[in-house]
Amino acid sequence: MLALGMGATACTSFPDVSSVLDLRVLSVQTDPSEVILTIDGLPSDPSAKIDPSALSIDPMSIPAIGVTPLVVDPPADTAGSAVTWSVSACPNVPYGAAPPSAGGMGDPAGSAGTTVGSTLCTEGAPNTWPLASGLVGDAPAQVTLTAAQLLTAFESDVFRDQYGNVHGGFDLGMPLNLQLTFNGGGETTTAIKRVLFWSHRVSADQKVNVIPTIPSVTGYVDRDPSTWLPTSPLMTLDPAAPTHVTLGKGIYLLPKYTPLPPAGAPPDPNGPTPTPETYVTTVLSRDPPYQAIPTIETERIRYAFYATAGTFSPQRTVDQNPPGSTPPPNATGTTIHLESQYQPPATLDDVPVDAATGLHLVTVWIVVRDDRGGESWVIYKLALDAPAN
């Protein structure tokens, strides 16, 4: 998901990316995040020109897509004002600039799981289709693209490689752009969310994406600096009750995801390494005839941490170490560290007191994302306490 802030009073830079101070789009969930259509009339020759008028999409294969944004606007919440939003769709442009860069050029080669051009939709253009509008916090918007719109999108997402072969959404997957525009308190923010459409099943074992979730979050205060394993008691955070955090101490938050330990791995109090999900996609072959070929990829799971006061370090974690990196220290050699340390502000001066509880409450969001547009999140409250005298 790409987000772009704009407006006369919009703040486009933040003291820390994990600190949420004004109108922010933290995540957008689309359910499903990936769709496999049934299209008749595709040429058997992948280099042949595609004639959209000769194609037809089985309407039963076009699902309604639920669109749920995670939008946060602390000033609007304090003032009791509403944030409105609308969603439109438009075809992806393979060679288009990706926001917020005004002149960047996306690389259309490779699978649709990579970041190709994700251009903003042009309001009023023939290929920009308004889908829904409403208030943030209402039920998820249910949007459905028509067969004609999807065929137009597939026709737009076409490019020729250096050898003149035709590629695009029909063989690499078609990322349709959903543009979400939010208005609140004089601020406007626009986000681009892509939903991946396949014109056909590229292999018998291809399955649509399963949206990742966070079933629970573990917290602890201290850990061993040499092993990174916790040395203080572990707690499971309660989404219905605030967790107390002392100023100057902070807390490590560890999201859980598919807790399946590697074969033969000893128990680890920090949590076992998740077992990554594999999925089928397509990539362009490096040799003639330069066709899209099915391949199996290992999906990465990424976490982002946000709070209304204080900061997180690191701001992002991922369940796989990047190639060539040195894994963090650990006791077993199997743990991938997904936790992030929450650092409270230095004082309680700017942390509002909750009228119902009398506590200085901070809202925390943890967003989980996968490689195919799947996103979800959890929300917790932290009660900040001054150190005991």
Image (cartoon, rainbow, N blue to C red):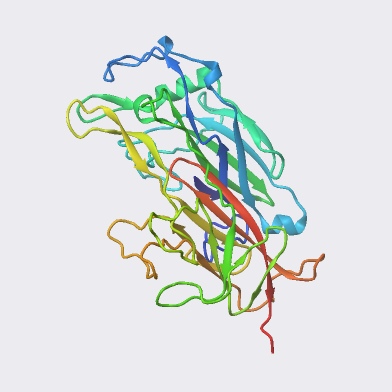
Which percent across, then down, holds residue 342? Answer: 56, 69
Which percent across, then down, holds residue 190? Answer: 56, 44
Which percent across, then down, holds residue 269? Answer: 50, 67
Q: Nearer the viewer, residue 323 or 315?
A: 323
Residue furthest toward the right?
Answer: 356
The answer to whether residue 250 shows anywhere in this view is yes
Residue furthest toward the top?
Answer: 54
The answer to whether residue 7 shows anywhere in this view is no
In the rendered image, which quarter is residue 111 located in?
Answer: top left
Task: Identify the residue at image location x=43%, y=38%.
Answer: 118
Q: Quadrant of the C terminus?
A: bottom right
Residue furthest toward the bottom?
Answer: 389
Task: Identify the residue at image location x=39%, y=30%.
Answer: 205
Query: Is 167 displayed left or right of 65 in the figure?
Result: left
**Above or below, 175 relative to 359:** above
Q: Nearer the viewer, residue 117 or 237?
A: 237
Query: Is 302 displayed left or right of 123 in the figure?
Result: left
Task: Identify the residue at image location x=28%, y=30%.
Answer: 293
Which percent across, then down, holds residue 249? Answer: 58, 78
Q: How many marks?
A: 0
**Above or below, 127 relative to 25:** above
Residue furthest toward the front?
Answer: 264
Q: Nearer the viewer, residue 55 or 120?
A: 55
